[in-house]
Image (cartoon, rainbow, N blue to C red):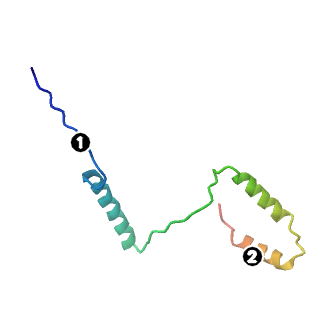
Amino acid sequence: MQQITTMLHVTKWGLPMASQISNRVQKHRDGLRAQGLRPVQIWVPDTRREGFEALCAKQAQLVATIEMDDTDLARDINIAVRDIDGWQ
């Protein structure tokens, strides 16, 4: 009777495969740092979240109904609008 031998390969976190990936990522990050960059994490609103569109519509409606007689507010809005020229 012929004996069949099967070898299994199991990779655990921190062992060869993960180590190669970790080294490659670290090399990439080191290159970016050498260019004068640094990593940051930015949290932004989730546009896919339920209710997001309704919240945007509500805020747009509030802005549309603001009394433009409020000269301080009108000035601030005009300054803010100037800053967004060219945004896409």
Q: Quadrant of residue 55?
A: bottom right
Q: Position of residue 11 (x, y in %)?
A: 27, 47
Q: Position of residue 4 (x, y in %)?
A: 15, 27
Q: Residue furthest top?
A: 1
Image quarter of the C terminus: bottom right
Q: Residue furthest left?
A: 1
Q: Which mark is residue 79?
A: 2
Q: Are marks 2 and 1 in contact (CB under 8 Å)?
A: no
Q: Residue furthest bottom?
A: 72
Image quarter of the N terminus: top left
In the displayed structure, does residue 8 sit left or right of residue 33? left
Q: Residue at x 86, y 78 (%)?
A: 71
Q: Quadrant of residue 72?
A: bottom right
Residue placed most toward the observer, 4 or 23: 4
Residue placed most toward the observer, 82 or 47: 47
Residue under numbered circle 1: 9
Label 2 vs 1, first from the N-terminus: 1
Q: Position of residue 22 (x, y in %)?
A: 32, 59
Q: Which mark is residue 28?
A: none
Q: Amino acid at mark 1?
A: His
**Front: mark 2 or 1:** 1
Q: Residues within 10 Å of mark 1 (few under 14, many from 20)?
A: few
Residue placed most toward the observer, 22 or 75: 22
Q: Secondary structure at mark 2?
A: helix
Q: Residue at x 23, y 42 (%)?
A: 9
How far apart are labels 2 and 1 at the CA level?
62 Å
Q: Amino acid at mark 2?
A: Ile
In the displayed structure, does residue 41 sit left or right of residue 81? left
Q: Quadrant of residue 14?
A: bottom left
Q: Secondary structure at mark 1?
A: loop
